[in-house]
Image (tube, rainbow, N blue to C red):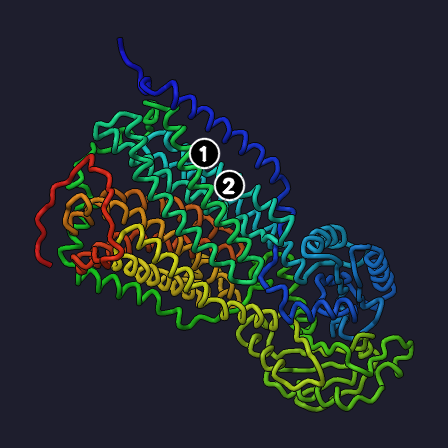
Amino acid sequence: MRQEPFSGFESRSVRRARLVVGLTFVFSLLACWYAVGLTQRLSPGGWTPPSADSVRAEAVLASEFRAGPPQLILLATPPDGSVDAPHATAAGRDLTRRLAADHRIAWVNSYWQRPLPSLRAKSADSALVLIRLRGDEQAVREAAGDIIDRFTGAHGPLRVSASGAAAVLDETERLSDEGMRYAEFVAVPLVLLILLWVLGSVTAALLPVVVGVVAVAATTAFLRLLDTTTEVSLFALNITTALGFGLAVDFSLLLVGRYREELAAGSGPERALRRTLRGGGRTVVFSAVIIAASLCALLLFPLPLLRSLAYGGATVVCASAVGALTVLPALLVLLGDRLDRWDVFARLRRPERAVSSGAWFRLARAVMRRPALVSVGALALLVLLAAPVTQVRFGMYDDRILPASSPVAETSQRLRAEFGSQWVDAASVVLPGRPGAMSGSDSVAEAVAVADPVLDAYARRLAQVPGVRRVDARTGTYCDGRRTAPPDASSRRFAGAGGTWLSVIPDGDDPLSPQGSQLAAALRAVPAPGPALVGGPGARLADTEHVLAGRLPAVVGVTVLVTFVLLLAFTRSVLIPVKALVLNTLGLAATSGILVAVFQQGLLAPLLGDVTAGGITDVVVPSLMFCVTFGLSMDYEVFLLSRIVDEHRRGSDTETAVAVGLQRTGGLFTSAALVFATVMAALALSSLVLLKLIGVGLALAVLLDCTVIRALLVPAVMRLAGRANWWMPRLGRRKDRSVPSSTPVPAAPMEAP
């Protein structure tokens, strides 16, 4: 009688497998149900430390002076004539009245409410309505989107368009959603084709998808729970989703590949699965711990964006590993001999070759024949690619990350051209509790004409700072250290019951650049008559740079130390972890250099369009990309090292161990990198510069890692190191417990390098 596959352990293993799959299905449904509406709850901000002086300055301005940077700026333009024409005035007052009646709006400053010259263009053909909203970022985000939908477009004889920080965030979110959907539309078919080719059948190709769905469902549910206690960034959801599917592919390729190897070596299904989990499971656990640790280092940064990425990233890594070690084996048990059915590329495949005649084995041998030459060439290439990083200019992105065709981008450009930079780029200097402020009087003269020589002297000093065009204060207007105009009706806005404040107009129109950060630092260095808070875009950039620069050494140190210790335990070697860290650093430097050349210097402008966004690189993105790409690089490193170390422990010399390890895993990590790079590169199709930067950067990082570093430098450096690869202090040695080889590979003679 013919024995069915898996019949020897069906009564136990199959029942358990069905239970695992059933529980996982129920858990995924509950997680998806709990996470419904998550994107509407997440914050689009989180780029600045909540305790920064710039954030406190804006809070004081909003609460005490009904001033500060407006979150929404409405630009109203009559189709013909002046904004002072009767029909335009009536429509403007009606617009202002309707806005002021909205309970979500803290204050409205309109030209038709308070006819300040600064609220009207010099040509008198457009005017501004400034809006400050109530509540936290989530409330501001929802209110801004609704106000933009209701009040932009035609409003009587006025044509109204929107700009300001809230409008930029609303437009960024809309374009981000469009870009993500378009990227999925392009990437999903390509990823499925890659998986079909690599895994060899439709059923096998669906396994990583199942693991990825489970991991992402668990992570979204966790982020939904986390959102009830702390701020969670919308970008964290997008990045962790891509990371979850990428790691699901990595872990699934590793385990399915090992399972097939064991079956091909003659093991039965039960023994093959047990040996797969014993060898490959250890690799998955170490890889997941290293990636999670590198992402958790982001918790040292006091930025909600990076901290939420750490929470979500570590969760999706652990969920991917758990899914690969529980759900995937259960599915393999249930599939049985149906794993390899429906191979749509069967006619294109070549017969399986012996390990010693495989392409990756032969490549490793070729590299190790000339290790010094290959090392010098590859290192020279990485240094050349990294060279532009010396010219990096850090800043923060504003409305210039939007495409030129965006209505918000068009309005922002008109604001700068017609009104200058005072409502968009101005810095604010707040003096809480400054005596002499008299905002309660109805008399303009009484409110502004109070002599205040100390404030006058402070305003003159601020006006002398290089990079300052003008200072407006309760005591008048100042330029180049002189008072150029006495106080007027508009000066009353600088007085409040809680103190006074000054508006500093910069010379340039890009405060979110190194010049803006330097100007904020210079303003803070000016001796003030009491405690002073400096706010504005440049101050936000300076505060963000300060915390990033201050915490970066600790983040890098923790990441390097934890990775070194884990690799030391994994490989039982001192040199191999050091080599891995050095090569990963070179790969990250090369990727950073390419990004500077493309997104700051416009190297590929004909292909990607204008992606320079003011010629700066966002100061937060490098920290984000460091932890993500460092973790992924170590993922591929662990996959490769696991087979090299196993082969060496079985008695092979270094050269044979490296060649066999590369043959066993070269296709694995290259395919995994290709899948992840495809998903990330699809983001380059977005119209947002930020998504282009992240997508291209992560795609380049993994492709450089799996080609130049993993395929060339690792074999060359390990060949040069020779026996030193395996040196370990005596106290760290312990008895090997390696898995017996199911497919021993004879050592091949090596030519002298």
Residue 52 drawn above or below residue 661: below
Task: Name the residue carrying label 2.
Answer: 216
Going by the numbered disc 1, the residue's amino acid type is Val
Residue 307 image position (x, y, % from top left): 54, 56
Amino acid type of the residue that numbered disc 2 sits on in the rendered structure = Val
Query: Residue 500 vs residue 612: left or right?
Result: right
Crowding at label 2, few (<14), some or many (≥20) Cα neighbours within 10 Å? many
Question: Within 10 angstroms of label 1, few (less than 14), some, or many (20 or more) residues?
Answer: many
Residue 210 shows which numbered tag?
A: 1
| Disc 2 element | helix
SS at mark 1 in the image: helix
From the viewer's side, name the closer residue of 593 and 211.
Answer: 211
Residue 61 visible, this orientation: yes
Above or below 25: residue 574: below
Q: Which quarter of the figure is the N terminus placed in? A: top left
Which residue sits furthest right? 442
Q: Position of residue 168 (x, y in %)?
A: 63, 59
- Front position in the image: 518 or 81: 518
- Left/right placement of residue 156 relative to residue 575 reads right
Percent coordinates x, y for residue 89 in the rendering: 85, 64
Residue at horizontal 40%, vertical 53%? 631
Dot 1 or dot 2, earlier in sequence: 1
Between 158 and 50, the one lying in front of the other is 50
Residue 668, above or below 155:
above
Q: Position of residue 648 (x, y in %)?
A: 19, 47
Residue 94 occupies which quadrant of the picture? bottom right
Q: Is residue 662 visible?
A: no
3D distance between C-alphas at marks 1 and 2:
10 Å
Query: Residue shown at 61%/38% (left/top)?
Result: 34
The residue drawn where x is 59% and y is 57% is 405
Tell me if label 1 and label 2 are in contact, CB under 8 Å: no
**Residue sitting at the far front:** 731
